[in-house]
Image: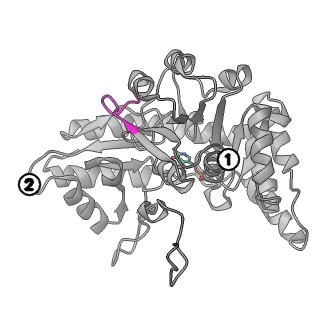
Amino acid sequence: MSIVANEPVPRPGILDIAAYVPGKEHAPGVARVFKLSSNETPLGASPKAIEAFKQAAGNLELYPDGQALALREAIASVHGLNVANIMCGNGSDELLGLLCHVYLGSGDEAIITQHGFLVYKIQIMGAGAKAIEVPEKDCTVDVDAILAAVTDKTKMVFIANPGNPTGTYVPVADIRRLHAGLPKGVILVLDAAYAEYVRKNDYEAGLELVSANKNVVMCRTFSKVYGLAALRIGWMYGPANILDALNRVRGPFNMNAPAIAAGAAAIRDGAFIEKAIEHNTLWLDKLTHAFEAIGLKVTPSVTNFVLIHFPDVDGKRAPDADAFLTSRGYILRAVKGYGLPNALRMTVGSEEANRGVIETLGEFMGRSA
Ligand SMILES: *Cc1c(COP(=O)(O)O)cnc(C)c1O
C-alpha cells in the first residue's frame, strides 16, 4: 500500500544535495571592497560588448532568436568551428545540467575528481545518479585514478581542465589517454572555463578530441575572461548526436537577446581579450612569487586565480587569514567545500587589489612582502 504524503516529496536523492554556495560579496563595515572570490575579470567587459547590450535594450518586447545564431556564428568564426556543433546555454552551468538530465538516471554513475567543480556533483545527483569521486594527485586530476573507477554503470566523466579551485591542468596527451581508455558509451565532459588564460604548449581545450569522437564535449564560458558573468553565457562544442539529444529538452529561448548580442561582440573583440590575458599573465606570476616570498605555499596555476595554502599553525590557518583579509576589504574564496580546508582561492584582480592582498597577507604572516 502506498503511503499518502502530506506534502509534495522530491525524487529520492534530491534532499541529499548540498546547495551551491557562491563566493562572498560583502565585508561588513569596510568602505572599500575588492571581490576576488568568483574569478571575475578585473578589466570588465569589452566596450563593444557593452554597446551591443545597450542596443539590444531597444527591442526587449521581442523573443530572442531561439537558435542564438549570431552568437554561435561569432564563436564558430573565431574558433574555426562548424556552427552546427555549437550549443549555447544560460551559463555553462545550464549545459552541464542538460548533459546530466539527458544522459543520467537512477542507477547510473558519473565520475568527478576530489577537488572538482561542485556544480558537477549537484547536477549528477539532481538527475538521480551517483557521483563517484576519485582522488587527485597534488591538486591535479589523476587520469589513472579516473580510469580505475570506471564500471559498467559509468555514463559520464567530468573534468575541469584547467581545474577550479586548483588552477592546475592536465596535458593533452593525458586527456587523449583518458579518452582512449573509456568505453564508447561514456561521455567525457571537458570543462575548459579557463582555457583562454592557459599559456602552455602541451595544453589543449579539447576541440580536436570533440571533432573526432561521438562521446566528448567541451564547455566554455563568457563569465571569465570575457567579463560577462552577469549575462550568463556558456557554450558547448559537441558531436551532432549529443547536441541533437540536448536540443530536444533545452528551453526554446534559453539565451536572452542582450546576452546573444553582447557575447557575439565580446568574442570578436580579440584585442580587448589579449589585454585581459596579458594583465593576468603578469600578475599570476607576481602574486605567486610574492606569496611564496612570505612563506605561503601556492599551487602552480595556469588560470586567473591562485590557490594559497596556509600553515597548520594556530592563528595562521585559512579561516584566520580569511577573517583578516575580509576585515581589510579583500574577499577571497574559502574552499573547504572543495576538500581544501586550509587554503584560500584568490582571483587575480586589479593592480591595486593585488598589491593590497600581498601587503595584507605579508602583515598576517608577520613578514613584509
Ligand atoms: C566559472 C566556471 C564555469 C562557468 O560557469 P558559467 O555558468 O558559464 O558562469 C564553469 N566551470 C568552471 C570550472 C568554472 O570555474
Q: Residue furthest bottom?
A: 6
Q: Is residue 199 above or below residue 267?
A: above
Ligand 1 contact, mark 1 (Cβ < 8 Å): no
Q: Residue at x 85, y 64 (%)?
A: 56
SS of the residue under disc 2: loop
Q: Residue at x 35, y 61 (%)?
A: 330
The percent coordinates of residue 87 (x first, y second) are 76, 43
* Separation (CA) of disc 1 from disc 2: 48 Å
Question: Toward the viewer: 61 or 315?
Answer: 61
Whether residue 166 is in magenta: the answer is no
First-in-chain label (1 vs 2): 1
User: Where does the magenta region start and end?
Assistant: 133-141
Q: Residues within 10 Å of mark 1 (few under 14, many from 20)?
A: some
Q: How is the structure coloured here? A: one colour
Question: Toward the viewer: 325 or 195?
Answer: 195
Q: Residue furthest left?
A: 314
Q: Residue at x 38, y 75 (%)?
A: 31
Amino acid at circle 2: Asp
| Residue of label 2 | 314
Q: Main secondary structure of the magenta part?
A: loop
| Residue of label 1 | 102
The percent coordinates of residue 72 (x first, y second) are 82, 43
